Image (tube, rainbow, N blue to C red):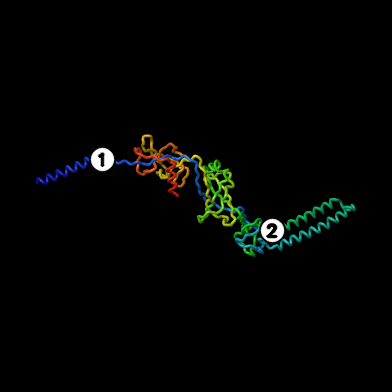
Amino acid sequence: MNRIILYACVLTLTYLTGCKSKKHEPEETNTYIVTSPLLADTSFTKEYVTQINSIRNIEIRAQERGFLQNIYVDEGQYVKEGQLLFRIMPKMYEAELLKAQAEARASDIELQNAKVLVEKNIVSKNEQAMAQAKLDKANAEIALAKLHLSFTEIRAPFSGVINRLPKKIGSLIDEGELLTSLSDNSQMFAYFNVSEPEYLNYQTHAKDSKQQLNLRLADNSLLPYTGMVETIEGEFNNETGNIAFRAKFPNPDKLLKHGETGKVLMTIPLKGALLIPQKATYEIQDKKYVFVIDKNNVVQSRNIIIQTEMPDLYVVASGLSPDDRILLEGVQKVKEDEKIKYEYQKPEEVITHLRLKAE
């Protein structure tokens, strides 16, 4: 019994000694990495979804009604300016021309007779004038008949590629009916929409720099030729807040076709941009926050507005200044109003390490 009591006392003493030693152990404190936003001139490449169009793309339609007598080209064929593409049966228009020519000869004979009679004072000069007007009308009918006859031969207005042929030989063609379309693919237009802030930045910093654009194709490859912004539309779209840019790309290999899609890659310069590492931020309900350390080393959360995103970096539009100290490591560990110990790293060193890591 005495042994049991002695054993219990030893256990109690051991427990009390252990508790007392734990109570006096110092609390473990973490040291966090802190940095500042970097104010610098930089640039980033942004992709814009684009619609690619031929520099010239037109519909070729019939200008006269009739049967399609001949088709001299095939779909996808390259044709030269002035080359004959279609012929609409010309018999009726040839007959109209012959009729107009016959009437003109008859009117010319009447005019000659009228001149002789006027010289002999048999008829008045008004008769001669009427005969002259009749001849002029007949000549006009000849010109009109020739024009209608020329419309039966449809030629390429410029060099390009023939597209689909919806009509076959023997089809009855109405005036204005679509026969095909023709695309000049020697150069291509790429249309893409730009937001108002990006437009203003372009006008301020990039308009006169003649910067080169790249074009990413649907298979994720890059067009081997660079393009340039050629023009900007005159007004913004009220619904989207965007404005359309038009870039021009050379197409010597004829790789690009009208109606193709892709992405324009444009390098956008940023003057005096405020850069912070992405890992220094956290998100609540689609809003970005950082932890700012005040003069008492106390952590305070702050909402920031992001202007644009770069690899491993955010460009801050508002919410921070270059003098602020922000938490870089341990964003998920600290709490609001917590006092911390930290080591400060220069923003240039931090961003350099991020870029090296990204490479």
Q: Residue 337's mark?
A: none
Q: Amino acid at mark 1?
A: Glu
Residue at point 71%, 62% (across, down): 92
How busy is the neighbourhood of tag 1: few (under 14 within 10 Å), some, or many (20 plus)?
few
Residue 263: where, in percent of width, then height? 52, 51
Q: Is residue 214 visible?
A: yes
Q: Residue furthest right?
A: 120
Marked residue nearer the N-terminal end (1 or 2): 1
Q: Using the image as rendered, state which of residue 198 and residue 287 is in the foreground.
A: 198
Q: Is residue 286 above or below residue 166?
A: above
How far apart are the alpha carbons under marks 1 and 2? 103 Å
Is residue 13 shown left or right of residue 212?
Answer: left
Residue most extreme to the left: 1
Numbered disc 2: secondary structure: loop
Please, what is the three-letter code of the amino acid marked with disc 2?
A: Phe
Q: Residue furthest bottom?
A: 170
Q: Which mark is residue 25?
A: 1
Residue corresponding to mark 2: 151
* 1 or 2: mark nearer the eye: 1
Q: How many marks?
A: 2
In the shown orientation, is residue 287 left or right of residue 9?
right
Query: As rendered, which of 98 and 122 lies closer to the eye?
Result: 98
Q: In the rendered view, would you say 276 is above or below 218?
A: above
Front residue of 359/133: it is 359
Q: Secondary structure at mark 1?
A: loop
Residue 9: x %, y % from top left: 14, 43
**Viewer-proximal residue, 242 or 91?**
242
Q: Position of residue 43 (x, y in %)?
A: 50, 44
| Residue at the extreme top | 295
Cβ atoms under marks 1 and 2 closer than 8 Å? no
Does residue 239 appear anywhere in the picture?
no
- Where is residue 320 shown, x and y percent of the image? 44, 38
